[in-house]
């Protein structure tokens, strides 16, 4: 397994629509393994292939406390959403350190394939429902701040730029020591 570099916003692959996977082979399984290792190391609860520069419709998710429940979905598609809109704080490995409040449906039904190509349906609520919506958005070229109003998105981008400047200053300071 190998840890992959996570593309940071506004990298072009984050705005691109991922292609449907038609070949289910060892290369796809290796990509899923590498994505899972990358997600766990980050640490995060979900990662879409776009985020590691691969425009294929594959996501890895693990919302368990002990990181023991990896879900790998190929060609996921949201069939329906329901429940009430839930306000929650959302973050993203491609917008490191930035968290904003969003409203998303509390329930979701998703159809996908596993790594062998077999079809499966998932009905989820809570954090898993939010994560599924977030990661499938990535496959469609949407990052979570795209759901914010123009004003809030501008503020979020300003905040993100400040976080990156501070991170660079810290790295430079450590390099000088």
Image (cartoon, rainbow, N blue to C red):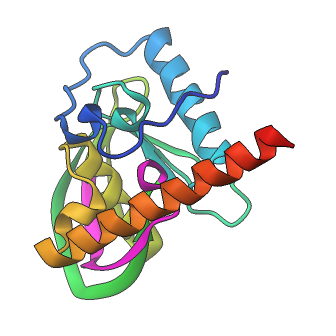
Magenta stretch in the rendered image: 93-110
- Magenta segment: does it hold 96? yes
Question: As displayed, is residue 55 above or below residue 145?
Answer: above
Q: Quadrant of the N terminus?
A: top right
Q: Residue at x 69, y 44 (%)?
A: 172
Residue at (34, 51) in percent of width and height = 135
Q: Decide if residue 59 is in sight here.
A: yes
> Quadrant location of the C terminus?
top right
48 relative to 67, above or below: above
Q: Is residue 105 left or right of residue 69?
A: left
> Considering depth in this image, is 93 or 26 the residue closer to the camera?
93
Please identify the quarter of the rendering in which residue 103 is found: bottom left
Left or right of residue 145, residue 91 in this image: right
Across and down, in percent, residue 28 comes to 44, 18
Judged left or right of residue 21, residue 80 is left
Q: Quadrant of residue 128?
A: bottom left
Residue 152 inside the magenta-drawn segment: no
* Residue located 23% across and 86% down the image: 85
Q: From this view, report whether residue 23 is shown above or below residue 9.
A: above
Q: Which image quarter: residue 139?
A: top left
The front one of 170 and 176 is 176
Please provide percent x and percent y for residue 126.
42, 77
Residue 153, position in %: x, y? 22, 69
Residue 43 in sight here: no
Q: Position of residue 43 (x, y in %)?
A: 64, 52
């Amino acid at each position: 397994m190998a840890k992959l570099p996570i593309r940071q916003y506004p990298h072009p692959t984050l705005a691109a629509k991922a292609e449907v996977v038609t070949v289910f082979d060892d290369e796809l399984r290796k990509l899923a393994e590498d994505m899972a290792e990358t997600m766990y190391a980050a640490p995060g609860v979900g990662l879409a292939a776009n985020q590691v520069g691969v425009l294929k419709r594959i996501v890895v998710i693990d919302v368990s406390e002990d990181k023991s429940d990896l879900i790998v979905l190929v060609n996921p598609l949201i069939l329906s959403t329901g429940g009430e809109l839930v306000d929650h704080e959302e973050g993203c490995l491609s917008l490191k350190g930035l968290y904003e409040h969003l409203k998303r449906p509390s329930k979701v039904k998703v159809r996908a394939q596993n790594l062998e190509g077999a079809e499966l349906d998932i009905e989820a609520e809570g954090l898993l429902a939010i994560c599924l919506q977030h990661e499938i958005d990535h496959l469609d070229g949407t990052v979570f701040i795209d759901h914010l109003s123009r004003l809030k998105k501008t503020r979020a981008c300003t905040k993100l730029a400040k976080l990156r400047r501070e991170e660079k200053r810290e790295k430079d300071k450590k390099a000088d020591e």
